[in-house]
Image (cartoon, rainbow, N blue to C red):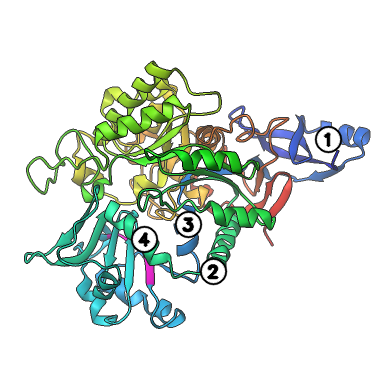
Amino acid sequence: MGDSIIYRTTRLFTGLGDEALPGSFSVEDGRFASVGAYEDADALAARSGASVVDLGDAFVCAGFHDSHLHFFHSALYSSPLALHCRGKNEQDCVDALAPLAARRPETGWLLAQGWRQPHWNPPTTPSKRSLDAVYPDRPVAMYSGDAHTLWLNSKAIEELGLSDDSEAPEGGSYDRDENGRLTGIVREAAAMALMPRIVASFRTEELLDAYRGFLAKLAENGVTSVCDMSLMAAPGLDFVRDDLFAELLAREELTCRIHLFPTLLEDRSRLHDLQESLASDRLRACGFKQFFDGVSSQHTAWVNEPYSNARFEGDCGRPTVDPSIMRDLVLAACAEGQAVRVHAIGDEAIHVILDIFEEGLDAFGPLPEGRRHCIEHLENFQPDDIGRLAKLNVVAAVQPMHITLDPGAPEADLGADRVPYMWPFASLLESGATLAFGTDSPVADIDPRAGLYTAITRKTIPEGNPPEGWVPREKIGAADALRAYTLGSARAAGRERELGTIEAGKLADFVVIDRDLASCDPELILDARVEATYVGGACVYRRS
């Protein structure tokens, strides 16, 4: 039996109620051994001989769990290997590459992420010409902020073996000018298929250093668990790098619990192999991931009625996978009792995948205990579908920061009639559904404070607009937001019996914060500071 430590605080948020109350808990062998009243700490210490750590008035809750991020890309774009740049316009992004070009090998790839065309002035689609003017002799790839579009220069197009006659893979596209020539813009599945070749120049040790850096950032932000969601590059090839995680685990450097979700394909052996080989409580494979549509900002999300600012007649986006193929894939996983998480942003994509999940439930019964299907992102709903998630036991894995990434864009793209059914967090909770919060990093920053603030206020950061919140009826309370970032995400990973609340027997992952996030003025959340982060009872971050 390992050493026991007792912690006490006047603000303990176990997740079982809505308030942070005086309390104490003991940690032994990496788990919460007991949870009780504040005054129990001294008596327990006297009986057990354990030391008591008095956290004063600090707020303590279960560690935050990011239910949806892309670890490889997040680590890469926050490292010296690449660049994160949103930019004010096309030329601003080109100019921002200069420091990266200076520190990377002269002939190597320049890789950046973050540009958001709707935020530019003017909001025009970029092309290879601006990159060619500055970098004619080295390949450049600029990944969009929503991670669905690549912007390449001519050298990159050449290095990747593309030509004006190239045909995009299913679910993707190449933009062409009026003469049929490639502009350098590559979308959806076509963009994802190119990324492995672009990042192949990075050495394993460079990538491990990038992973270490991102793990440190997670700990600094109080994040103790994540779900690493695949971005399929090609059949059988995605960016769930179990090899890098396994190496860090072997070196005892994995300071966060990692839950892997490789791509759902007809050949499902990869998940089966990972589930057999990964037995650590720090590294597990928990289910499949698939894409059903794109994003509304590019009119690639699949909607039931045409976009309000339609670019052509019948502009409803489209599924990235034929619905009959998606049905076959998901039902095959259901037959094996495997959970599936599906990217579905548009209301028609959501409607159809719910139909498929319902068919799977009718045909094969509920999934085994601890496994839950999830829909990822869920931007806008057909009203009758909001209540179906709870009925089908499907988790809504949502990213609150997406609400405010493109102010004004939802109204322009989908129109006023559909806005009330966008990101309906309160309605989903009222229906009995589980919310699981995350960031979609690197699309949004990993900081949970921003997600909590946005879910509670539905206002932009830092402007605070609109003052009453965007679709204010869908605001949720602080306790519900905290649970969505802890217990809800644990459910999405199939680990609610081990993670997500401070209860005896669960893994001792918790975070210490300088203010009461369950009751403070929401405007103070963004200034909250993580004082310490614990994983399995071990401190992985302490603010100096």
| Label 2 crowd (10 A; few <14 / some 14-19 / many >=20) | some
Query: Which residue lies at the image location 26% right of the left edge and 38% below the top edge?
Result: 346
Q: Position of residue 184 (x, y in %)?
A: 22, 66
Instruction: Give the answer, above or below, for where 116 lies relative to 341.
Output: below
| Label 4 crowd (10 A; few <14 / some 14-19 / many >=20) | many
- Amino acid on which disc 1 is placed: Ala
Q: Are marks 2 and 3 in contact (CB under 8 Å)?
A: no
Instruction: Give the answer, above or below, for where 129 lies relative to 21.
Output: below
Q: Earlier in the sequence, mark 1 or mark 2?
A: 1
- The secondary structure making up most of the magenta span is strand
Q: Earlier in the sequence, mark 2 or mark 3?
A: 3
- Residue for badge 2: 206
Can see residue 520? no
Q: Earlier in the sequence, mark 3 or mark 1?
A: 1
Q: Residue 540 occupies which quadrant of the picture?
A: bottom right
| Label 3 crowd (10 A; few <14 / some 14-19 / many >=20) | many
Q: Residue 150 occupies which quadrant of the picture?
A: bottom left
Q: Position of residue 21 (x, y in %)?
A: 68, 33
- Amino acid on which disc 4 is placed: Met
Tag nearer the camera, 3 or 1:
3
- Amino acid on which disc 3 is placed: Phe
Q: Are marks 1 and 2 in contact (CB under 8 Å)?
A: no
Q: Residue 396 occupies which quadrant of the picture?
A: top left
Q: Earlier in the sequence, mark 2 or mark 4?
A: 4
- Residue for badge 1: 41
C-alpha gap between disc 2 and disc 3: 12 Å
C-alpha gap between disc 3 and disc 1: 42 Å
